[in-house]
Amino acid sequence: MQVDPGALRVVEAVARHGTLTRAGAAMGMSQPAISYQLRRIEERLGTALFERGSGGCRPTAAGEVLLRALLPALAQIDAALAEVAALSRATGLRILTDFGFAGLWLMPRLAGFRNAHPEIDVQITAAQEMAMARPGEVAIRFARAGDLGAEAWLLMPERVMPVCTPAYLAAHGPIADPADLARRTLLHLDAPPEARWFTWASWFATQGVVRPRRSGELGLNTYDFVVQAALAGQGVALGWMPLIAPHLASGALVPVGPEIIRPDTGYWIEAPGAVTPALQALSDWLRREAS
Amino acid sequence: MQVDPGALRVVEAVARHGTLTRAGAAMGMSQPAISYQLRRIEERLGTALFERGSGGCRPTAAGEVLLRALLPALAQIDAALAEVAALSRATGLRILTDFGFAGLWLMPRLAGFRNAHPEIDVQITAAQEMAMARPGEVAIRFARAGDLGAEAWLLMPERVMPVCTPAYLAAHGPIADPADLARRTLLHLDAPPEARWFTWASWFATQGVVRPRRSGELGLNTYDFVVQAALAGQGVALGWMPLIAPHLASGALVPVGPEIIRPDTGYWIEAPGAVTPALQALSDWLRREAS
DNA sequence: GAAAGCCATAAAGGTTCTTTATGCAGGTTG
DNA sequence: CAACCTGCATAAAGAACCTTTATGGCTTTC
């Protein structure tokens, strides 16, 4: 049967500290736990590694043989683990997000983060469907509370309003109310069934209006394509804040209906693994930029 | 949080075999178990060690750093474990037993074992109360079935009969029956309450006779002292077979009552840990000597 | 003789780790 | 282009491991 080198840390600690009690204290374990682990190792090896008594423990001949190899080997492993951990801290982050968020919100702002943190390498991986993030990665995904792990946190809640260009209004007349809006040409963001964001249908439902998608209306599967179509005056789009905030600020797009806010749905952040300084810095920056 | 060097065997196996599936096969584990272990290590380190895909796994930069230290360190540990295991096989045995068994049965025979197995170092540790045997040790203790672990086995059942010297009989007359025996001077083996062997009281109980210990009767806490007192003609002793077999054979002691046999009580052998060649040889020899 | 320190073991409960089942992705073959 | 194969990922269930507290015994020291 294999001996687990992990449990051999117990052997090293007992040799170093001289008693099971002190070895346990050093390892954050109780004395019986150390005794149990040591007995298990000795059973697997078929020989005793320590002689025990009231004065503590002394290695047997077999114990000496093992310790001679174990001490340098564990030191080497620990040095490598420390180097990997340091590498992980210094190594940049990969941000996984959707195209819309990447193009409309993140990329325009990233220069600010990179200026503030030149030592952190950032990679952005935009995809239509994101894999689960792994250590060293941050996923920024549109989700609803409960969809993600307990450690995910909400970056920005969903705030959405219908928008179009002033030129569209000049050409087609102003939009008086949601019923009037329902008669206009809408631009659709195509999405897989599990997508959590508003659709036109669900947005109108909040206004008490039933408005299914008409044939011939433009559908696009990437949000910044939807925004480009709206900027080209091809119809009315749903505008997500703060993604379209710059276009509202410049007057290129204007709101033509009320803003709906859902506090439990929106862009959530998920970052498994240890909180590294790089991750902490990015998280702090994202919170400031989102508020 | 510490990374368990035991789990790092998974890292080494994945690097060596190139896929989680093959690493699992090599380690006798399923592929999801390997996947789970690897993910746990990566979470603790805060970085990915492998890039995975349908073509298998390739170490990341961090993975390379770790593997560079890990491979020699694990090789060193495994070599030491092999050496310890070899040592354990070659190393002798320590036999723990009581004084009576050691002096009357084991020591007189041990020359035979040592002649047959000169390469096995044997130590005998006789004590009144034995500690639990640990790996590399054999306990030969007087017990009843159920007192010990499931792997203990019965070396010799308890066989006991009253004995005295012929000179004692010449001086005090022959002993006709148990009732007559109850009137004679008895030699007692003092024992702690948990001792499993017969006492005079329990021996007489099997004969339907109530015979408590009289004041002034000799009590000794070591069995070969009891035998010595019997040989000196100081009274009648309980004789345990085969401990007193030589004295019966020589005529120095003669039976003066029936032999009682208890098949589930007697000298049991207990040897925790792996069965080494030395242990196997001793067990075989003990079985032969006892039959 | 009492107290302190040490080790050993049992019992209880929590955590880890294994399995099977299953799904998805990518590559290969027909 | 479809089917199949290989590989990885995850969930759920159950087994195994490992921790704790409680406790007892032994040795040493004061």
Image: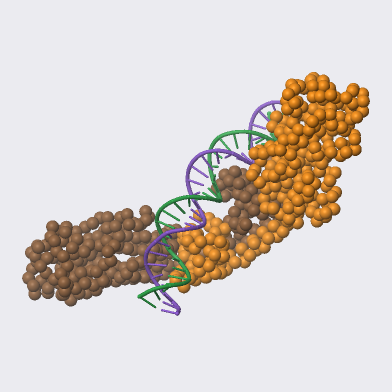
Chain colours: A orange, B brown, C green, D purple
Q: Is residue A240 left or right of residue A55?
A: right
Q: Return the x and y of residue B216 as percentages of the image width and height.
A: 16, 74
Q: Nearer the viewer, residue B46 or A275?
A: A275
Q: Is residue C25 above or below residue B20?
A: above
Q: Position of residue B139 (x, y in %)?
A: 36, 63
Relative to B59, is C26 above or below?
above
Residue A248 image point, x, y percent = 87, 36
Drawn side of residue B201 relative to residue A173, left or right: left
Give the left or right position of residue A48, taking residue A195 as reference: left
**Residue sitting at x 57%, y 65%:** A26
Q: Residue at coordinates 67% horizontally, 50% vertically from top-left?
A: A273
Seen from the viewer's position, the closer of residues B8 and A122 is: A122
B129 left or right of A269 in image: left
Decide: is B152 above or below D10. below
Residue B97 visible in the current orientation: yes
Of A9 and B82, the residue lying toward us: A9
Quarter that holds the C terminus of chain A:
top right
